Amino acid sequence: MNTRSGWRILFFRLLGILAIAVVLPLVIQAVRIVWFSGRTAYTLQPFTQNTLAARIRILFIGDSTAVGTGAASNQQSVAGWTGKYWPHIYINNWGENGLRLVDLVDRFQPVLIMPYRAVIIQIGGNDILRFSDLAEMEKNLTIVIERAQRIGERVVILHSGNVGLAPVFIWPFDWILTQRTRAVRDLYMRTAKETGAVYIDLFTERDNDPFFRKDDVPDFYGPDYLHPSGLGYHWWYTRFRQTLDKAYVHFD
């Protein structure tokens, strides 16, 4: 065997190894997503609370996290926990599975009939997962916030925690999605400051994330290992409530 032939064989072997190293994680990740998503029923309806003669009205809009997908009941969503702790308020909910910011811009065309004490926007997780353009996200988020401000005294926004820590994701996708979540978090925080909205920061690092404790995965995550469970949403609600208190947003 001459030197040139030997190098050629080595090159193609290394190329094959590289191809396997790239393709195999993609295949495994795709199988995990399909497998775990099949364990979740996307049939929950958004939580609403039609309290008679309520003086305080709030509106939830957004994606599957506004619906409460992953929880056993819509009463365990952020909206549901809000209704439990504030049973005297009226809650409207326009949550819908699968929405991105661009979709919410199309759907959210509010007309002021009766003002809301607050409009809570839960959107952004799908934009993280689908790698929506950040500049377009910023533009669309600003549009949604400005529309919400027409009908609500205060506007509150939240998207997700550290998506890369969801157990459904393997390396390197977990790392990539953590970086992606950081970028979207920075965008939301900046936009909230510029528009006067209240941002609920759900991001935590791996070492401090209660969702990432291996023994607690069945408790904090839904069956798809991506969406929160009822307990996970309650943790979100706790951060939600703490931030609202600091921002002097009250529903009493």
Image: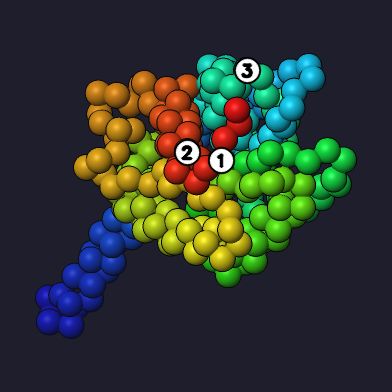
Alpha carbon of mark 3 to alpha carbon of mark 2: how far?
A: 18 Å
Is residue 20 visible in the rendered image? The answer is no
Q: Please tell me which of labels 3 and 2 falls first in the chain.
A: 3
Query: Could you tell me which residue is drawn at 62 percent across and 17 percent down?
Result: 87
Q: Earlier in the sequence, mark 1 or mark 3?
A: 3
Q: Nearer the viewer, residue 252 or 229?
A: 252
User: Element under label 3?
Assistant: loop
Q: Which residue is mark 1?
A: 249
The part of the image, by quadrant, that contains residue 67 is top right
Q: Which numbered disc covers residue 103?
A: none
What residue would you read off at disc 2?
Answer: 245
Looking at the picture, which amino acid does disc 1 mark? Val
| Rendering coords of residue 79 (x, y %) | 60, 28
Q: Residue at x 87, y 40 (%)?
A: 113
- Which amino acid type is shown beneath numbered disc 2? Asp
Q: Is residue 178 left or right of residue 111?
A: left
Image quadrant containing the N terminus: bottom left
**Amino acid on which disc 3 is placed:** Pro
- Picture quadrant of residue 22: bottom left
Estimate how packed mark 1 is, as few (under 14), some (14 to 19) or many (20 or more) residues with alpha carbons within 10 Å: some
Distance in Å between CA atoms under marks 1 and 3:
17 Å
Give the Cα separation between the discs numbered 1 and 2.
Answer: 6 Å
Is label 1 in contact with label 2 (beta carbons under 8 Å)? yes
User: Which mark lies nearer to you, 3 or 2?
Assistant: 2
Mark nearer the viewer, 1 or 3: 1
Residue corresponding to mark 3: 87
Residue 76 percent location from the top left of the image: 53, 21
